[in-house]
């Protein structure tokens, strides 16, 4: 039994580290060339539900094709939320009823259903280098 425990402990010590992956996000068809695209990347249904991203990034909306590259993410599954912060105030604009007034979107172009889609609708595998275009509505 002690030998098995020692072997398992040794495997844990010499186990290879998680591979690093790169995610490139593009945002085609923006209607305005002002402000910034705010990007939040989530690695689990729990982080998606809590709104606490694993990684955040931005892309300039002034570019011909706004692009963000997130490097060094562990291989796994992820989902992305993005909003085009047209007025540059650092947050999603909403009307008095809480409905978004600035363009937003999700990985896989998952459609919102009375709020953000489920993590499962927006999730995608990330291993190596992956590119995804997100169309903001």
Image (cartoon, grey):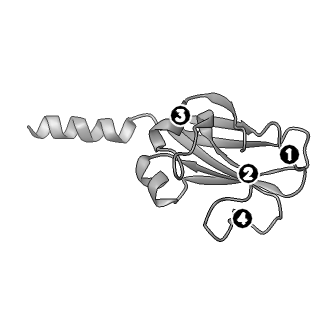
Mark with earlier residue (2, 3): 3
Disc 2: CA contacts within 10 A as few (<14), some (14-19) or many (>=20): some
Marks 2/1: CA distance? 9 Å
The residue at which mark 4 appears reads as 93
Front one among 125 and 74: 125
The residue at which mark 3 appears reads as 19
Mark with earlier residue (3, 1): 3
Residue 103: which numbered mark, if any?
2
Residue 37 appears anywhere in the view: yes
Marks 2/3: CA distance? 33 Å
Marks 1/4: CA distance? 16 Å
Quadrant containing the N terminus is: top left
Instruction: Kindly state the secondary structure of the residue where label 3 is placed.
Output: loop
Judge depth for marks 3 and 1 and give the one in front: 1
Say above or below: 33 vs 10.
below
5 left or right, relative to 12: left
Disc 3: CA contacts within 10 A as few (<14), some (14-19) or many (>=20): few
Mark with earlier residue (1, 4): 1
Could you tell me residue 13's position as x and y percent? 36, 41
Disc 1: CA contacts within 10 A as few (<14), some (14-19) or many (>=20): few
């Amino acid at each position: 039994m002690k030998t098995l425990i020692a072997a398992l402990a040794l495997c844990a010590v010499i186990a290879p580290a998680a591979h690093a992956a790169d995610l490139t996000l593009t945002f085609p068809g923006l209607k305005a060339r002002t402000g910034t695209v705010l990007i939040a990347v989530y690695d689990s249904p729990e982080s998606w539900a809590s709104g606490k991203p694993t990684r955040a990034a931005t892309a300039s909306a002034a570019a011909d094709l706004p692009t963000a590259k997130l490097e060094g993410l562990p291989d796994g599954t992820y989902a992305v939320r993005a909003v085009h912060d047209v007025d540059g105030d650092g947050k999603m604009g909403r009307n008095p009823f809480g409905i978004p007034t600035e363009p937003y979107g999700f990985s896989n172009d998952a459609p919102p259903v009375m709020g953000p889609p489920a993590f499962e609708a927006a999730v995608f595998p990330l291993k190596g280098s992956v590119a995804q275009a997100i169309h903001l509505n």
